[in-house]
Image (tube, rainbow, N blue to C red):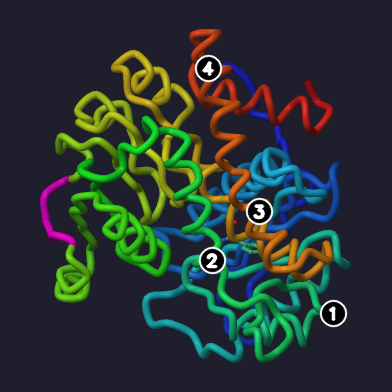
Amino acid sequence: MNRTESFEGEVLRVVRGTRSGVPIAVAIHSTERGPAIGGCRIKPYPSWRDGVDDALRLSAAMTMKCALAGLPYGGGKTVAVLPAEGARRRDLIADIAEAISALGGRYRTGPDIGSTSEDMAEIHRLAHGWAFCRPEAQGGSGTSSAATARGVLAALRAGVAPGSVAGSRVGVIGFGSVGRLVCESLLAQGADVVVTDVDGELRPVAEQLGASWTTADLVRERLDVLVPAATGGLLTAESAAACGASLIVGPANNQLVADEVATVLRDRGITWIPDVIASAGGIIHAVGREELGWDEAAANAKVDAIADTTSAVLSRARERGSTTVRAARELAARLTGTG
Ligand code: PHE
């Protein structure tokens, strides 16, 4: 390497939980627009350093996500690197709450891969209320899945020709809580949906909805729309070069392994809707309901406005011949006052 990589964030705190022994990283990328927010990811990684890297990358994405969604917040993320033998849930959650508490409110968490609304209730109780999406019965806005799916559908609408969802062929990678809701809605709109998930046990559930199941790599399949709804890193230079979709839009975070992949997609005429835009529904709904005083209708309207942000980025990219990543970054920079 011929240059030193600069640290773009504000805080990176890595602790080994005193109760669970689990490495926990909390990254605050920016508090320029307001407190940093971002989900709490609990999963195994090849090494704890990979977990730290993921926290850094995801926290930067959250800054952009909040800016593009027009929210008065910055970006952060928590990653707990789950050991192969697992950890006692209570201990782990208490350790995560302690790590968040130590940041004094500059960061607030929410559910993410591996964490639930119930976990958020516990963190909320232990960490001064700095957790979104507790169950509704406990005063929170509940799981963010429905709002996230709603946002994906808004972005998708903006990316396809009006009225063309019916009869289109859509591939969904990842049949988790959000992927499933997106499938349901697309099927109801008359799309032909094919699903894949690493968990083969979900097959009958998908088929019962009316989707077809495949174990093939959907990235390479000929599709009108590809919906990445699993973990990130799906699009590499190689997979982008082999991609058979016309439009890519989904809730997975960090879908591109690097910004350059966006160039490959653009050159091949594939429209990629930046994940920081398409996946923002959950967070818009949660902070709107819990902290910004919006009622359900107002929160839904803001989630639907993801369609406008998508259109703005797609036209900016088209007009300038740039990638959608670049267009989104420029728009975000204008909103954060850094550009
Ligand atoms: N997983 C959510 C995201 O990445 C995290 C989140 C949801 C944080 C809701 C706060 C509130 O956007």
Q: Would you name the residue on which mark 4 appears?
A: 317
Provide the residue span drawn in magenta. 211-217
Q: CA distance from mark 3 to mark 1?
A: 30 Å
Residue at horizontal 70%, vertical 31%?
332
Which numbered disc covers residue 247?
Answer: none
Q: CA distance from mark 3 to mark 4?
A: 25 Å
Of the numbered discs 3 and 2, the one sitting upstream in the chain is: 2
Residue 142 versus residue 289 in the image, above or below: below
Tell me the kind of residue under disc 2. Answer: Asp
Of the numbered discs 1 and 2, the one sitting upstream in the chain is: 2
Classify mark 1: residues with Cα within 10 Å, few (<14), some (14-19) or many (20+): some
Label 4 sits on a secondary structure element that is: helix
Label 3 sits on a secondary structure element that is: helix
Q: Would you name the residue on which mark 3 appears?
A: 301
Of the numbered discs 4 and 2, the one sitting upstream in the chain is: 2
Question: Can you tell which quarter of the image residue 97 is in?
Answer: bottom right
- Looking at the rendered image, the disc whose residue lies closer to the viewer, 3 or 2, is 3
Classify mark 4: residues with Cα within 10 Å, few (<14), some (14-19) or many (20+): some
Residue 82 versus residue 172 in the image, above or below: below
Residue at horizontal 59%, vertical 86%?
118
